[in-house]
Amino acid sequence: MIESVLITVVQMIVALLASPFIVGLIRKVKAHLQCRQGPGWLQPYYDLAKLFRKDVVVSTHTSWIFTATPYILFSSTLTAVLLVPIFLSKVPLNFAGDIITVVYLLALGTFFLMLAGLDAGSAFGGMGSSREAIVASLTEPAMILSIFAVGLTAGSTNLSTIVHKTALLQGIVTDPPPHLMALAALFIVTLAETGRVPVDNPATHLELTMIHEAMILEYSGRYLALIEWASALKLLLFLTLISNVFAPWGIATERTPVWMAFGVAVWLVKVSGLAVLIGLIESMFAKLRLFRVTDFLGLAFILSLLAIIFFYILRG
Amino acid sequence: MVIHPDLGSQLVNLCSALLLLTCFAIIAQRRLSACVDLFALQSVFLAVTAALVAFLTGAHHIYIAAALTVVIKVIILPRILKAVIERLNVKRELVLNINIPSSLLICGALVILAFYITQPIISLGFLLTQDSLAIALSIVLIGFFIMIARKKAVTQVIGFLVIENGLFLGATAAAYGMPLIVELGVFFDILVAGLIIGVYTHRLQDTFDSVDTSKLTGLKE
């Protein structure tokens, strides 16, 4: 019992500490490719610390939704992170929810963020919310279907079971084509959901293009810090999903401290590798026009749908 | 060195799945030069698949076919197509008969159809490349679809080449490659077809000031 609580707390601390690092890593990769030095490794942490110390400015036109949203967003994202296996394949909280819970915990945060964008009544916030609604409604089915495709081979929708079985190669009929399609779909969903380049640009405040930044334009101080931290956590969650659902090897399957320390190291390497890949993609590709985003996300949906259908056809 | 047959068949299936993925990327792509690059990438995967089959079955003539694939489909044909694109100054496929999301849906349906049709054949065989036959058929169907759905001559050429890739994958998967002389003939055909279509596209541009093939149906004095 105490062991389980301890592991959950450690997982929370690891995720909270690692998420700004991943954001910083992506910025560093982009800076290097642009032949810049870029800010130091600790800059995202300094930013958060600075924002937490600053005062909050809240418009008089806003309702309780505006002040509640940062807390709802942060806590729902953090809860979702605790349900995803990071360094131990069977997370202690796995009884609390499966992949559907994770998806809808994230959707809850997105929903409140959209409301908050509308709440302040500024034109940018409304624009950001409506764009986010398009993206979120298109990514959600693709995300669920792609993980279901893997869940079908593992025979469960519980993330811990999926990861545990895949890590031990237990009763898994490995099928490259469906897995590969689901992986491609989940990667596209990751780029879209975390506001990365072909869909959104995290480094801009240009009104024509921004989606996520437009919604949080009215926020300041500790509210902004919470939202920034929550989006870093969300990015970390998606990268963890990709690495641990599709290639969980190296994750601890037993609760021994040495195994788990090894698991943390392997996980950090995998997640950093994916972060470098995202940095490369951000440097190589231009942002898509908003109306082309549907093509891109349609591709993710079709791929994940095919992954599921392959499973049924190939297994009879 | 001998690879476990199960692992070998997994690897072949993985490579064929990558071929199918590039097909979908070609459909979702609007820029012509990116389409050509994706075709070259697909041919790389095809060569890798062929080399894997050659390694696993010991059929050495497939190595030659894989090498020819690299030379002709990865190096020469993309260069010819890029030169055509450069000269014609067509950058984008702006006019589509069918828009991209519905194209993707239709291609998804085509893949399901291909898997459904080949299922009885696959269960009969004992080849190490089970899924590859179904994937090969899907690629052929998608290639046909690209030729029908796109108007620009350059994209239609890419559709034609995608069909050829699918056929080659099917031959490798189902029969462990055709006799070398047939393969040589096919490669020569493809090369000549690429050249002829390049010339034809130039003529199209000169006559109609456009490479839109739907203009060919209009009568002209």
Image (cartoon, coloured by chain):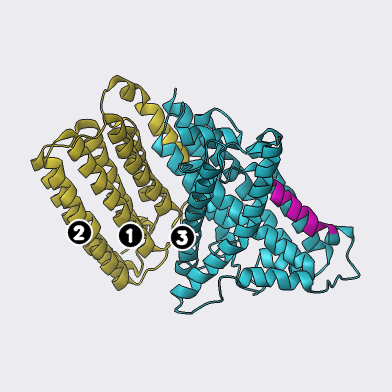
Chain colours: A cyan, B yellow
Tell me the kind of residue under disc 2: Ile
Residue A299 falls within the magenta-colored stretch: no
The earlier-in-sequence mark between 1 and 2 is 1
Q: Say which element carries label 1.
A: helix
Frontmost of labels 2 and 3 is 3
In the image as oriented, which residue stretches furthest toward the bottom? A36
| Circle on res. B196 | 2
Position of residue B21 measured from the top left corner of the image (x, y, whole percent): 40, 47
Frontmost of labels 1 and 3 is 3
- Quarter of the image with the C terminus of chain A in it: top left
Nearest the viewer among A166 and A67 is A166
Q: Are marks 1 and 3 in contact (CB under 8 Å)?
A: no
Residue beneath disc 3: A277
What is the C-alpha distance between the residues marked 1 and 2?
17 Å
Q: Say which element carries label 2.
A: helix
Residue stretch in magenta: A68-80
Q: Are marks 1 and 2 on the same chain?
A: yes
Q: Say which element carries label 3.
A: helix
What is the C-alpha distance between the residues marked 1 and 3?
23 Å
In the image as oriented, which residue stretches furthest toward the left? B181
Residue beneath disc 1: B36
